[in-house]
Amino acid sequence: MNPRKLLGGPAIVAYLALVKLLVHLGTARVYGFFTDELYFLACGEHLDWGYVDMPPLTAFQAWLTRALFGDAPESIRLFPALAGAALVLLTGALVRALGGGRFAQGMAALAVLVAPVYLAFDSYLSMNSIEPLLWMGCAWVLIRMIQTGEVRLWLAFGALAGIGLENKHTMLLFGFALVAGLLLTPERRLLANRWLPLGGLIAFNLFLPNLLWNLAHHFPFFELLRNIREDGRDVQFSPLQFLALQAVLVFPLSFPLWTGGLLRLLANREARPYRALGWAYLIALGVLLLTHGKVYYLAPAYSMLLAAGAVSLEERLRRLRSLRTPAPRAERWLKPALATGLLLTGALFAPTALPILPPETYLRYTEALGIAQPKIENRGTGPMPQLFADRFGWKEMAETVARVYHALPEGERQRTAIYANDYGEGGAIDYYGPTLGLPKAIGGHVSYWLWGPRAYTGETLIVLGDDSEGIDRHFEEVHEVAEIGHPYAMRQEHFTLYLCRKPKGWRSLQEIWPRLKEFH
């Protein structure tokens, strides 16, 4: 192999992708499973074409990774780590497609590596880790269409968009934004052909199973969104706050890079053919501001802006070569200085998004730096921020439930159901329960409600996370049997465990199950 290739742009990007993969696999065991992650694992045990709060791809990932690699944290988090590494590689490809050289490829890939939002996304199993790959895959296909005029690539675009819709419905937002961006530029010429509707048909057919599932279940996701809005669970940000948080999520030192990329796409003469990408970002941003979308919903779009910004930076530095000394010397030292500064400050702030430090060390570290994760939900936290707090206490909770369950007389134990009041609790029972001799959980929260009460009548329940006043209305016997609560867990995961017997006014769980639905 040519030694120069080992220091070329693609090689540098590959090294950074490998670093990202190793970082995520190396930190997979530092904290426990995230609450959503436990729920996704439970969904993987109930494979279907849809769930109350998501399309099926994440549940399929959960099933597949356990089937192939087992239940270890490194196994379950392998796909997110691979997706993160692949995003670094794809960012390098975007830079090359936009005309960037070795420095631009390295800077853009490094910016993706240190971005707090991607460090967080790729640290646990969810739809958020694969979503940036699908968005940026569509962007790369569009760039290739612009460059080659090969409109048959709409078929590949449609395939990626269809898979994206089976992963997360926000794929529709980016697909719409890209097409709208094309309409606003001379590249609209790419729309007037038979391959676009054929690509759309591919996307529709891939999405169709989930669409039919939603039709059959009366679109529960809309009910969920309405309830979340009414509950006020999500923090509402002003447009300025929303924009400021974009800089925080992508990393403050990368702000000039991606904003420079946006300006290049919108205003630079050489980048004029790719102006649709800049418009796509602004359109997606506008839709999210108007609909009060979550602050991280735009995160999958930033790789293309970082790529364009790195190309712009490289061109500016290249112009220094045409100047007289000492400018050429400045250009030589400025490149490694910029890369080193981004790498070192990114490493300094990485523990705020990546579960890499023990909790006590993390608290001292963030106090010393004076920084914290932004709060995006109106839920009570303890000393740890939500992204980390939701990873504590699940195994301990399951072990406490197991002690109560196995203390019951054998005959009663066989009739006793474990009722979880949120999907994290249910997922924890389902994940840790088999080794503790526990049955699968039941509950009314989101998809657990769809899975029903199994064969339980409800004559005896172990209830997690409810209030005694509410339980007293439904049972004649209510006993407080244990207290649940990890010092670093979310506040709602500090609760009393109840043993309930003798239902009041109802004969079976099947009878009252419709009233137990909790879509929030």
Image (cartoon, grey):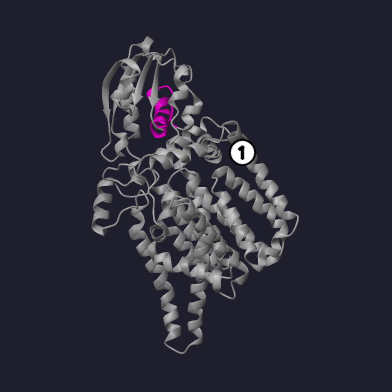
What percent of the width, then of the height, locates residue 237? 39, 54
Q: Position of residue 74 (x, y in %)?
A: 44, 42
Residue 67 at x, y percent in the picture: 53, 34
Res 419 visible: yes
Which residue is identified by label 1? Answer: 211
Q: Position of residue 84 (x, y in %)?
A: 49, 52
The residue that appears at 45% across and 19% down in the rendered structure is 512
Please state if 414 lies on the left or on the right of 62 as rendered.
left
Q: Which is nearer the eye, 367 or 161?
A: 161
- Front residue of 209/88: it is 209
- Quadrant for the N terminus in the image: bottom right
Instruction: Examine the rendered structure and indicate whether residue 301 appears above or below residue 336.
Output: above
Q: Of helix, strand and loop, which mostly describes the magenta segment?
A: helix
Q: Residue furthest bottom?
A: 324
Residue 508 drawn above or below residue 13? above
- The quadrant of the image that shows the C terminus is top left
Q: Tell me which residue sits at (35%, 41%) in the image.
A: 390
Q: Which residues are magenta?
A: 423-445
Query: Tag 1, which secondary structure?
Result: helix
**419 or 324: nearer the viewer:** 419
**Is residue 69 visible from the viewing direction of this image?**
no
Is residue 36 inside the magenta stretch? no
Q: Residue at x 44, y 89 (%)?
A: 325
